[in-house]
Image (spheres, rainbow, N blue to C red):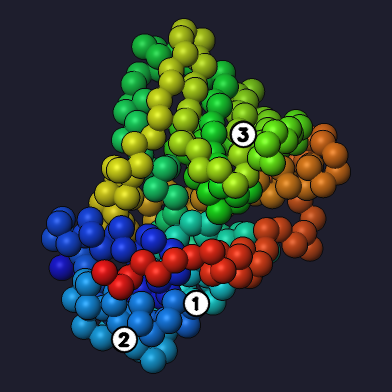
Amino acid sequence: MIKIGVVNIDTSHPKMFADYLNKSGRARYAAVYNDGFRGDDEVDGFIRLFGLERRCKSIEELAEATDIGFIQGCDWDRHIECAMPFLKIGKPVFIDKPVVGNLRECRKLEELAASGKAILGSSSVRYAQEIVEFSAQPEAQRGKILNVFGTAGADEFNYAIHVSEGFGGILGTGAVSTAFVGGTQIDGKTNETFYVRFANAVTATYCVTYGVWQPFEFVITTTKSTFHFRIDTGRIYGALLDRICDAVEQNKREIVPMPVLTESIKLMLAGRISRAKGGGEVRLAEIPANDPGFDGAAFARGYALSASKIYLK
């Protein structure tokens, strides 16, 4: 059985993942290192709930004691830092979404992957059964894709990255530019729309509603028909975790190539820049090297303030 070492249990994902893995019997959380906002009471609760063997005093100790690292802190600006002790000793890591939040760290991940490091991830939506089933249809039957439309809610990056990675699952790579189209505010809720162009002439559009959870809906227009589905969030964690277990058991260094994962982030970075300019196309290749990107530390502070205790039962 695969032994997982988890770095920080900030979000609900460790709990949800552990529930699934305990049923599957292929892997389990075996040890934890925590320097996030969860207190000792919740760390002890997590250990007790899922039968972990130990709480480690350093990430280095955690890496030595387990087969794979799960980086699950909600400050994505620390993800590479937390992954390095595993990568340095040749062990794989799964980095939870969003993997990173700026261009510099996208390039760092690409360099690490190109050097042979095993980095797995990230959004469970990319591997959703609905996307897999659509993609399995022969193009001659479903038609060539013209446009993909997706929806997300809650926040501009931590949740919206699911839709961007969904685009990756459906379209693969090849995004050229993103443009902020516009937004509206009604009853204190803001919705924004972004438009993406791909090198093969396919386009994509995504809408994000801030402060409101929205289902992950995809509408795919092809040369023959229109396909619509809502992602079943009750199944997506299993779809992702099964892929991770397959990769570890088969000694694979990736589930999808790192440039495909990082393109989903760059797509959104270009959209953020376009919005700051008031709209207009921003090419992914022209994102400034010093662009600050999305602020992981600020997101983590806000998340901590609103988080309830979830690991005590």
**Where residue 224 appears, x then y in whole percent?**
46, 8
Alpha carbon separation for disc pair 3 and 2: 41 Å
Residue extending farthest to the right is 277
Element under disc 1: loop
Write down the residue under mark 2: 55
Residue 37 is tagged as 1
Q: Position of residue 99 (x, y in %)?
A: 52, 59
N-terminal label among 1 and 2: 1
Label 2 sits on what residue type? Arg
Amino acid marked by disc 3:
Cys
Residue 64 in the image: above or below residue 268: below
Is tag 3's residue or tag 2's residue first in the polypeptide sequence?
Answer: 2
Q: Which residue is mark 3?
A: 207
Spatial separation of the CA atoms under disc 1 and disc 2: 16 Å
Mark 2 neighbour density, 10 Å: few (under 14) some (14–19) many (20 or more):
some
Left or right relative to 140: residue 100: right
Which residue is at a point 41% across and 75% down the rendered structure image? 7
Q: Is residue 32 above or below residue 313?
A: below
The residue sitting at 43% across, 81% down in the picture is 39
Q: Above or below — where is 293 with respect to 232?
A: below
Q: Position of residue 88 (x, y in %)?
A: 44, 80
Point out residue 252 in the picture as x, y percentages from the top left corner. 32, 58
Towards the viewer: 281 or 238: 238
Query: Which quarter of the figure has residue 235?
Result: top left
Can residue 264 be seen from the camera position used here? no
Q: Amino acid at mark 1?
A: Phe
The answer to which of marks 3 and 1 sits earlier in the sequence is: 1
Number of the front mark, 3 or 1:
1
Give the total number of marks visible in the rendering.
3
- Quadrant in which the N terminus is drawn: bottom left
Disc 3, SS? strand
